[in-house]
Structures are given as C-alpha cells and as structure tokens.
Image (spheres, rainbow, N blue to C red):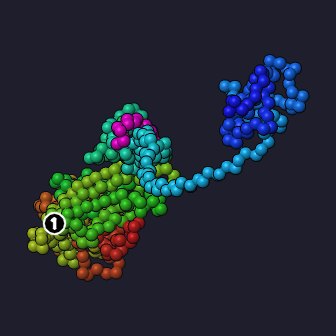
Amino acid sequence: MSDRVMSSNRVGNVTLRRNGWIVAAPVLVAALVAGCSAASQAQTNSHPSSTPANATAGTSPARTSDGVPTTAASATDPTLSTSPPPPTTPTKTTPVKTTPVKTTPVKTTPVKTTPAKTTPPPKRATIMTDPRNGASDVNPMHTISLRAAGGTITSIALTNPSGKRVTGTMSAQHTKWTASEPLGYDKTYTWSGITISSDRGVRSTITGHFATVAPADTVGAEFFNEQSVKDEGIVGIGTPIVLQIYGTVASAYRADVEKHLRVVSYPPQQGSWAWEGTNDHGDVLHYRTKHYWKPGTRITINAQLYGVPYDGNGAYGAESLSWHLKIGREQTTYGNIATHRIRVTQHSKALANFPTSFGMDSVPARRTPVGNYVTMGKYLKYEMRSQRWHYDEWVPWATRISNNGVFLHGMPSTVDVQGIKNVSHGCANLSPEAAHWFYDHSLWGDPVIISNPKADSHWPPNGPEQGDIWDWTLSWTHWQALSARH
C-alpha cells in the first residue's frame, strides 16, 4: 500500500488521490486515520501557523492516565472518508442456562442463655416472743416463751431488774424456750441471747423486754383445816376441803377464781366447789364430793391464785397453794338423841357403843341440833365457856364437830345420867374413858350423824347457823348450785 500513497515531505500533510486505493477494511482505515491524526497533531504542535483553513476548532480529545485518547478523531475532518462502515454482523449470544443452587437452610439451635445468678443475702432467724416486745401489764402467771423461726437458739436469758435469771426449759430442737416459774409483780424483764440462722449460719442477737402488772392490793389465802390435820395428812371420808381467802372476791370474778382451783383424786370422784359465804376474814370456799370419799383415796389440791384478779380495782391473789391428802379407813359415828347412845362403826362393822347425854330436851336453846357433822379438831383439854349459861369449865378429850360449840368430850359430872337423859348445853357428854377412846380413834373429817326419831318441828337442824362445816347437810343438787361455774 505504501507505493499507492503519495506523501509529501511533511508527515502531517497527507493527500489521497481521487483515483487512489481506498482501503475497505475498517481496521486499516482506522489505523490510517489514527496514524494521520497523530502526524497531523504533531505538525500542528510544531507549526501552528500551518493548520488547514478548513479545520474545525475544538477541545483536545480526552486521554487516559497513560496519555491514550479515549475517543477517535472527529468525523467532520474533510480529509477522512465519509463512506459508511461495512455492516457488522451482530454476535449471537447464547444465554447461559444457570441452574439455581439449591440451598438447604441451616437449622440453628437457639443457644439457651442462663442469666447470671446472683446470690441473695442470707436470712436471719426470726424471733417471736410471748408476750410481745414492749408489752406492759403482763400477768405474772402468763406463759412466757421465745421462739426462733428459721434458726436455732444457742443461748437465752430472761432476767429481772436485779439481773437474776428466770428458770426455763429449751425444746429438743433448740427452737423454743419457755419459762418454768412465775414472774414477780410490777417488774420489767429483759431478753438476751444468740440465735444462728439455718441459712448460712447468720448470728443474731436477742433483745427485748416487757413489764408485769402492778397490783393495787394482793390478797392471801390458806386451807382452813391444814394446820388441824395430823397423822401425815390422813383424813376421814367426810373431809371437805376448806379454802379461806383473806379478802373478798367480786361476783364477776368468782368463776375465774374457781377455774384456778384444781382437785385431783385417785381414784377419780365427782366433786364441786361452793362459795359458802363470808366470815370475819373474807370469803370461804368448800369442796366436797357427791358421796363420801372412798377409803384410801389420794388427793392433790392446787390453788393457783397467784396472778388471779379478784376484782376490777387491782386486787390479785398473793400466792398459790398446794396440799396433799389421803383418805384413811371408813369410820362413821351415829348419835341417837332419843336413846342417848353413841355408836361407832368402821367399814359398816360395830366398833364401839357408848352411853351419852345430849343437850337438854326441855330447853330448845340447849338442844343438840340434828344432822350430818364431821370431826374437825381434837383437844386434850378444852375450856367450855358460856356467858349465856353462866359456866366456865375445862373438859378432857374434846373432839369438835361444830364451830357453834358442839363437841364429843369427857364430862365426869354427868356420868350418872349418861345413857338415861339429856342434860348438857348441847354437846354429847361421855365418860373420860369413852371420850379418850373416841379421841384416839377419830380422824379429821370422820362423819358424825346425829338424829332424833322423836324430834318435834322446833328441833334445830345442823346447817350454816351451826358453824362453818355444814357441807353434808345439803343435797348434791343444792351443793352444786353454790358453785360460780354452775
């Protein structure tokens, strides 16, 4: 091709003859155009005044970073062929068949997260006291206790104002302490000690206090026949239990007082208390059984009067009492005013039979009252004195059966009429020997039953007006009615 192209001596001034060859291949044209453009540009840079007159002014083509232009020369250049490029056959593209990748979902197991475990603070043992902490006017007989929940008691003390400890007992589990003695009136008691909790052994200090009631008055009491009973506490089958209170108990408080009087017998026998009235010292209560005590019965009496209120004015029992008795053999004495005789039996068998002289029949005021008595005191000598009958005399071997002056005693001056007529001032006269025998064979509480088959309507019966012990003159129903609890 080089021999068909006429070139001037300037690289950039290339002229194509009209009859010259025109390269049809697009590649060759492009190479030529590119080469000419490069040459022409070089000439232009070297000789700007030789730029053809018909050249179109414009901006320089864009180039790459390496100086390579990114577009071909302008198609308006008159030195370039305007023939259209040969048609190009479009490249047939075969679409690539893509097989979708089957993805298997990954089964994920959720991770179980455990929250961080925080340890709670340890629990202390809970202390509960009875009475409550800070309580006042506590009855000294109240059951005093302290309990630890959720722990154990390692040491405990309940002290009075002087620092003396109250005695008490601890449960086997060391969770409860209970006082075992009564407290004092008008005192403040203080708790102290240590507990250990079941939860990690937390140690806690026991504290607290309470105060007992301050009475306006304290009232004493005693068993009436306690000092009279000898022979190691062995008594007769008709023995009543007599409690003397040295003060009065308001009616509204009697039932509560009675609840604190307990009689336990073996073998068990039915009995009841009765408020028999008031004497010079105060109120008197008696206890008797429905029938006479069974021989050999053992009896325990507890009068828990300490701490018991007697009225609404602040009077309380000063002390508690206890007594033990034993019922001896069965012995009953029968006196017959009409026959002037005294007959003694043991276990229903005749033991003795004595002549006697009762109170003078012709003088109503001197008659011996009839009814049920019990022996209630014995004296080697006793002074019989009466202002009404103007006499004062000492008698031997006197056994009392009434607080109104009825005795079985020796009387030497009436021996001649004993068993024949009644001449006494109300007592049963016996010979000194018979009186001595009766004295020796009698126990406190032996029944003595005096009757008079010939008694008229004016004959005095034994009863409350005859003395303190008239318990067996009442029916059982009547006796029960005297209790504040019936």
Left-right relation of 447 to 31: left
Q: Which residues are magenta?
A: 197-213
Residue 405 is at least partly visible in this image: no
Tally of numbered tags: 1
Judge whether residue 51 is colored magenta: no
Residue 97 is at least partly visible in this image: yes
Which type of secondary structure does the marked residue at label 1 adopt? loop
Q: Residue at x 56, y 55 (%)?
A: 95
As rendered, which of 63 and 156 lies closer to the eye? Answer: 63
Position in image of residue 340 (x %, y %) = 19, 74
Residue farthest along the top direction in this orientation: 46
Position in image of residue 7 (x %, y %) = 76, 26
Left-right relation of 318 to 345: right
Amino acid beneath label 1: Pro
As rendered, which of 444 and 233 lies closer to the eye? Answer: 233
Quadrant (top left, top right, bottom left, bottom right) of the C terminus = bottom left
As rendered, which of 440 and 159 lies closer to the eye? Answer: 159
Q: Residue at x 24, y 76 (%)?
A: 451
Task: Name the residue beneath numbered marker 1.
Answer: 295
Q: Residue at x 38, y 64 (%)?
A: 275
Residue farthest along the right direction in this orientation: 53
Position in image of residue 455 (x %, y %) = 28, 80
